[in-house]
Image (spheres, rainbow, N blue to C red):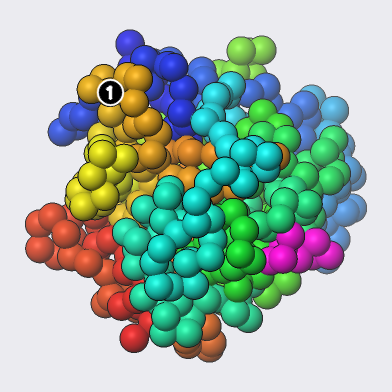
């Protein structure tokens, strides 16, 4: 049985992580089981035509049997609570209403995990780097951070580009403000949580921490360094400690990122929705029309923030899945509107030979026309060296109480977010479309010439991008 494992692979003794590649991909019948949680009880997304809310929306919702909880007026969406069984029917009859959708809670990340960590106490034993870039005095740079070399971040740093003045939103499980590699770049005042039962930004999962460090771990003569070490991070918690989140939290997080002037929004998260619909374990049915509505709403929000100045990047997924027009399912947000979708590359046996190819497509990466660019996210070969430090082929970054190796398109996406921040330092008024064009023009065209199923338009190159 093939099992979807989400957008994060981690160092673990889990033989089931291996998924064979294939030319075509059909979603298994149980694909949604590990990717969904219980639905939100009687909470809905009321979506209006015309991308704006009518003036009397509160009254209309009340008359239909509900109450407005949150308004997203700039995109014509209201989050509504209702216990009246007739609410959906009543609300759909209101003029101007396009959809009344269940505000489903989905698991956007895999569940329990094990990581290979380095604690603060162990950090003192690691020798410093020997390269001539600003990574020179980051203790873990030369020893572990091959991914910075893979995108030639040192070349951009040497040219004077570190992401200074660029705000990057991290929509994830949160960020610990006390981590010494993240505290210098994290804007705590702007950081926020849309998880009502976790109203703090601290990361109880570890995923958001790892992603944030790849983007902008500070140049502070300590620990690791990010692609854009002077960029400003904003933690926007849209997932709880299990990696689950309401659909509305993601929508609100994107709009908040745009409202605070974030030039880049990273979403190292995702799930798969069968276009025919599905049923939750408690019997709640999410029909085909609901799926169409949810995907339309996410595309609407992403299109809004993109057109208003926020470059949106997301992980393509880790299931060896072909993102080429399978009519039976859709991967979100990777295939949503203007999202820039990232596949993953990495070395094999870098720990044995630092001259190996860093750009090999990972065995687990999703691929196809849905991929826009590739970036390093780690490769793994458990079988050849079960007792060796194969985790060195994964991506090293910040983690609660230290650092950790992880692998996945979750790690690839923030490399692109970091390169986008470098571009925006070099071109401060560039639009998201212009940033994408610069990424295209500067990417390393690997694989088949032109657009490639594995690399998209190429693997991002930081040094070329700021020339």
Q: Does 2 sit above or below residue 427?
A: above
Image quarter of residue 286: top right
Q: Residues within 10 Å of mark 1 (few under 14, many from 20)?
A: few
Q: Name the quadrant of the C terminus.
A: bottom left
**x 72%, y 51%: residue:** 179
Q: Does 102 sit above or below residue 423?
A: above
Q: For the residue labelled by badge 1, is the local secondary structure a helix, a strand or a loop?
A: loop
Q: Is residue 263 left or right of residue 62?
A: left
Please, what is the dominant secondary structure of the magenta stretch?
A: loop
Residue numbers of the magenta segment:
183-190
Q: Is residue 173 left or right of residue 25?
A: right
Q: Is residue 189 left or right of residue 332?
A: right
Q: Is residue 187 magenta?
A: yes
Position in image of residue 248 (x %, y %): 69, 45
Q: Is residue 202 magenta?
A: no
Report the residue marked by disc 1: 385
Judge whether residue 355 can be spotted in this image.
yes
**x 82%, y 38%: residue:** 198
Position in image of residue 158 (x %, y %): 42, 80
Residue nearer the viewer, 54 or 365 = 365
Position in image of residue 22 (x %, y %): 18, 29
Q: Does 35 sit above or below residue 342?
A: above
């Amino acid at each position: 049985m093939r099992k979807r494992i989400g957008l994060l692979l981690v160092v673990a003794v889990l033989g089931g992580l291996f998924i064979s590649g294939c030319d075509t991909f059909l979603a298994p019948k149980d694909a949604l089981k590990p990717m969904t949680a219980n639905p939100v009880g009687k909470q809905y997304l009321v979506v209006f035509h015309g991308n704006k809310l009518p003036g009397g929306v509160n009254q209309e919702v009340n008359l239909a049997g509900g109450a407005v909880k949150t308004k997203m007026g700039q995109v014509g969406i209201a989050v509504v609570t209702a216990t009246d069984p007739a609410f959906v029917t009543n609300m759909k009859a209101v003029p101007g209403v396009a959809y009344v959708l269940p505000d489903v809670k989905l698991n956007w990340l895999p569940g329990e995990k094990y990581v290979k960590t380095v604690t603060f106490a162990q950090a003192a034993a690691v020798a410093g780097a020997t390269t001539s870039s600003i990574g020179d005095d980051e203790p873990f740079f030369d020893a572990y951070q091959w991914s910075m070399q893979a995108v030639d971040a040192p070349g951009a740093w040497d040219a004077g580009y570190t992401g200074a003045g660029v705000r990057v939103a991290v929509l994830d499980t949160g960020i610990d403000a006390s981590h010494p590699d993240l505290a210098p770049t994290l804007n705590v005042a702007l950081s926020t949580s849309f998880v009502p039962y976790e109203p703090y930004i601290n990361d109880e999962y570890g995923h958001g921490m790892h992603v944030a460090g790849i983007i902008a771990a500070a140049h502070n003569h300590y620990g690791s360094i990010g692609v854009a070490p002077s960029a400003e991070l904003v933690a926007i918690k849209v997932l709880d400690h299990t990696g689950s989140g309401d659909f509305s939290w993601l929508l609100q997080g994107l709009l908040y990122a745009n409202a605070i002037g974030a030039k880049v929004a990273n979403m190292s998260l995702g799930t798969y929705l069968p276009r025919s619909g599905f049923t939750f374990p408690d019997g709640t049915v999410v029909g085909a029309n609901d799926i169409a509505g949810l995907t339309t709403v996410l595309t609407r929000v992403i299109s809004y923030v993109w057109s208003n100045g926020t470059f949106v990047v997301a992980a393509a997924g880790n299931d060896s899945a072909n993102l080429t027009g399978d009519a039976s399912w859709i991967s979100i947000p990777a295939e949503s509107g203007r999202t820039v979708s990232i596949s993953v590359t990495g070395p094999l046996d870098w720990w044995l030979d630092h001259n190996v190819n860093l750009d090999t497509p990972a065995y687990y990466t999703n691929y196809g026309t849905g991929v826009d660019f590739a970036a390093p996210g780690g490769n793994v070969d458990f079988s050849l060296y079960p007792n060796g430090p194969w985790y060195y082929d994964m991506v090293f970054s910040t983690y609660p109480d230290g650092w950790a190796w992880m692998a996945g398109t979750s790690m690839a996406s923030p490399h692109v977010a970091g390169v986008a921040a470098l571009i925006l330092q070099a071109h401060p008024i560039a639009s998201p479309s212009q940033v994408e064009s610069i990424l295209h023009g500067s990417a390393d065209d690997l694989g088949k010439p032109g657009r490639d199923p594995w690399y998209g338009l190429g693997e991002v190159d930081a040094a070329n991008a700021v020339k």
